[in-house]
Amino acid sequence: MKGYMKITKNRIFFGVLLMLQVLNLLVSLDINYFFIRPIFGMAFLAFVPGVLLMLALKIKKKIFWEAIVYVVGLSVTFLMFAGLITNWVLTNWKISEPLSTSHLIVVFNFFIIILLILAMARNKRIVWTIKLPKLKFIDWLSLSIPSIFPVLAIFGAVTLNNDNFNPYTTTMLGSIALWVVMVAIFGKKLDRNIYPASLFFISLALLFMTSLRGWYTTGHDNQLEYFVFQLTKSDYTWDISEYRDPYNASLSITILPTVFYSLLGINDVYIYKTIFQIIFSLIGVSLFLFFERYTSRFVALLSVFSFISFPTFINDMPMLNRQEIAMFFFSLVLLELFAKTPRSKVNRILFLIFGFSMVVSHYSTTYIAIALFVFVYVAIHVLKKNPLGIMKKLKIRPTKSRLSLGMILLLFALTLLWNVQLTNTTTGLTRVITETYKNLGKTFSQDLKSGGVLYSLFSWQSLDKEELLKDYVKTGIDEARLRTSRDRLYDEAIYSEYAINLVDDHRSPPRNIGQWLINYQIDPFGVNFYLRQVIAKIIQVFMIIGLIVILLRKSKFVKNLDFEYLVLVFASFVTLAIFIVLPVLSIEYGTQRLFQQTLMISSLPMVIGFFAFLGSRISVAVLVTIFLSLSGFIPYITGFYYPQLHLENDGVYYDSYLLHKSEAESMKWLSENYSTLYDIYSTSSSHSKLKSLTGLFSYKNVLPGVLTKEAYVYLDYTNVDKQEDIVSHKGDLFIYKYPIKFLDQNKDLIYSNAETIIYK
């Protein structure tokens, strides 16, 4: 029948066998013409295992896009745990390099065939009828525009990497805003499939414009993520005892990328830069499906749009690959938790599969998820007793809870099993809890909180970077005196002659619009700075307004009210408040990262709040403005504001996190020529880059007062080019003028390539 395609049981069976043989051929012969091996291999690994698991578990998803996110989620789960089983079994059999290509392809053939047999045996008859949607011109137009966004993001990143002018990324950001406005006008005429497909492309574009910056690993956390990946890849074995650290306990950044590398033959840097971003982009689809259960398609789209507009998604998530995978699984946990048929056998199995996949992907995401679920479970059972007549006043009838005590306990048990019993990597969590408890008396002290707290609803003060610099200097010197003898350090009389002064963050020159504002006595920097401050408050205010509106049933945009979901929204507010109020927590984890995770739950009530209070047209205008500001579009076109990594070759993120070729060369030289008898000192950003690229450890401080006389001192591109050091201290970044003259007068220059310097 025209427009239809039927897939039967036999076609699935022989189709999977044929695709498996093609993959075997490509891998065994290392065929990679026109990148056929990584493209075909990635398609196979992303879909085939998930489809077979869906069939084996008899999971039926009628909605195409829901089937897609479940299939990819199950496939990623399969890759991690199949790799883990392979690693453990072959290691116990004394077989070296268990995760090498030759071993993985054999084991994966075995697993795929077992899954195929199980899927065929569990399903006597399979007939999938795939109906191609009949798209109108407006549908094709609405879909074709977002499909171009990732291409523009790639061109923009590559252009900047080659030190050329970048018109592509700004064009893309402006076009995304216009596309949202267009959907607001024609949304009712669009086919439903346009929404999730477009959100996937937009999410991917926003991630690509940051992840593809630089020719090496660019970022903060992902430098150490790349390091543990290299540990696993170096001998094709994952061994937690080799480096007992929460990073190395995350299968998402150890076994998963090693599997991709072995089977796809892709450059290892681009596994993080591209493959992980493609997988994480599906979170937009997953959240759309989640929100759509409670509201209209357009409001669901705007809710996801708000989630991907937040700066952490744009600037930091591509540098947090383990959290990307974990948050994708968290979105699937939410989808399953609030499914139409909750607490069925298959529902609980999927909840635990995705939950355990989240556990082995990222520790902090898991801890926050469990805390939210515990809060919801307790709150629901308290509210069912109708204290103060709350349930009666809100006209809410108690229903059977979606979250059972057994589900929470099992997830908690799996977390303990992995982090305590199998990997023993909970020392960080224990330390944070201990430090928070010890400092409860300093709850209102800003010294024990990150600058991100200043964007909270009830704070308008600015970060005192002068005090932060003084604390950094004092802390560094105190730590140096504790770990080494005074005679190995330079006398205070010597290093005190070299001033350590704070430097203002760099600003772009005013552009045409910015110059126009200046002509009218309007400060472009002030406009952008206070706009972001106001946006931070507005987002939080309208989250609260939205929750109240939903509770009082005052919005026509809410359907199928689920009280347990509203309690989860409230739980996310409470969790944020705890991180803001209690000491240490915001420094150790970061309020913005927590806020990004809670936005997966609370961005819907925020949009509902906007619609209820401002109306649909003004709400769209406000949300688009928020996106244009937070994405860097408005600051870029005005100029005279902090440069963004995805838009310019300047700024704090560029100076801190982009690894230059000159740095890679000098780090390689150091690894080949240094003596293990002496310590290495580098900046905080170079510390991660050095470990990622060479495995060398360095003390991440180059202040004159902390250096030992015989140590190596590594100065990176920013230290040499601008004579500055960018420091991450207590969860915040600041810049100080670095006294290179001290090193010139007190140490010997042993290496220089004009852009980086090494002293001894």
Image: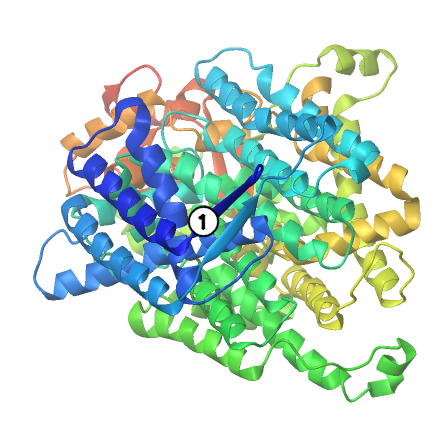
Residue 697 at least partly seen: no
Colouring chosen for the image of the structure: rainbow
Q: How many labels were placed on the picture?
A: 1
Label 1 sits on what residue type?
Answer: Ile
In the foreground, 219 or 580: 219
Q: Is residue 105 left or right of residue 434?
A: left
Give percent across and percent down for residue 583: 60, 63
Q: Which residue is located at x 15 percent, y 33 percent? A: 29
Q: Which residue is located at x 25 percent, y 27 percent? A: 32
Q: Is residue 475 above or below residue 87?
A: above
In the foreground, 221 or 87: 87
Q: Is residue 619 above or below residue 449?
A: above
Residue position for label 1 = 7
Task: Find the residue positioned furthest to the bottom.
Answer: 385
Q: Is residue 356 above or below residue 716?
A: below
Q: Which residue is located at x 20 percent, y 55 percent? A: 107
Give percent across and percent down for residue 21: 23, 43
* Label 1, residues with CA under 10 Å away: few <14, some 14-19, many ≥20: few
Residue 664 at least partly seen: yes
